[in-house]
Image (cartoon, grey):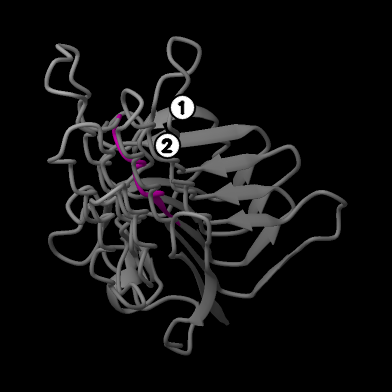
Amino acid sequence: MWRVVFAGALAGCNSLLGIHDLPDDGGRGSGTIDGGVCYGSGGFTICLSALPAQAATPSGSIDTDSATDCPASYSTPSGNPWCVIAGSSVTIGATLRASGSRPLVLVSTGVLAIELPGVVDVSSHIGNGSMAPATVGAASDTGCASGSGASASVDDKSGGGGAGGSYATGGGQGGAGDTEAGGPGGATSGVPTTLVGGCSGGYGGAGDEPASDACKPTPSDPPGAGGGAVYLVAGDTIQLDGVVMANGAGGGVGNQARGGGAGGGAGGLVVLWAGTAISGGMIAGGSVLSTNGGGG
């Protein structure tokens, strides 16, 4: 029996991929409810109200706040709703990208396989104007942003940079401006005990143009959002030959010449639970698990 958590942590120029075992409950599932079955343990317990009769092959972009996109009937620890897609088997052979306030949970009562070129992506993305709008990964934690850089108070000085987002470990402090401090990293959460994504970075501080300049700079473009959270659950085996990503987004640029840049978001959370084994990496270019923090 395997329980493995891959937790993204430090944003900015660095990232951390930590591997932790979840408590072993000694069985395939934690029990049954009304003909269904439970998997996992503690804050990672997922109970299906009924066993799925069909295989699931989800792909495309889904909204974890949508009942249509998250059809499984389930129960979880109180007060922590999840978006659950369940099947007698679950196969990801294309890109599945999830955004929204709830974490993504894929549950197979048999084998869960991510096959090349399959990708499960709950990352946040900074966007590229009209070419690619910014997105926030599923269950990115928007309530724990790191500190913003100080704005300049003296003419012709630059603002400080925003800090990188924190999660299991602290994000990097933002760079200082001419006389203004960079933003401090936020509080850390330690090893996660349930499904929640990484924290956002901080805003960069505004610079200060000469008083005679009517075009004053403003604080930075938005900081990077933290990576989201995804839980892969299999009653039998998890076969990983594709990619799972919960990366934080990069921070926005400073506005005008003297504005401080924003901090990147922390990497998110990937949790794996399998009743038999977790395997993969037998195919060149496959089996990638990524929870990188975004650059400042």
From the viewer's side, name the closer residue of 187 and 148.
Answer: 148
Q: Crowdedness of circle 1 by 10 Å Cα count: few (<14), some, many (20+)? A: few
x%, y% of residue 122? 45, 43
* Relative height, residue 28 to residue 231 (above, below): below
Residue behind mark 1 = 61
Residue displayed at 33% across by 53% down:
176
Residue displayed at 22% across by 47% down:
142
Question: In which quadrant of the rendered view does residue 238 lie?
Answer: bottom right
Residue 173 in magenta stretch? no
Q: CA distance from mark 2 to mark 1?
A: 6 Å
Q: Are discs 2 and 1 less than 8 Å apart at CB?
A: yes
Q: Earlier in the sequence, mark 2 or mark 1?
A: 1
Residue behind mark 2 = 98
From the viewer's side, name the closer residue of 156 and 193.
Answer: 156
Number of numbered tags placed on the structure image: 2
x%, y% of residue 209? 21, 25
Q: Crowdedness of circle 2 by 10 Å Cα count: few (<14), some, many (20+)? A: many
x%, y% of residue 91? 63, 44
Residue 229 in magenta stretch? yes
Read off the magenta span: 221-230
Residue displayed at 38% across by 30% down:
135
Residue 2 visible at all: yes
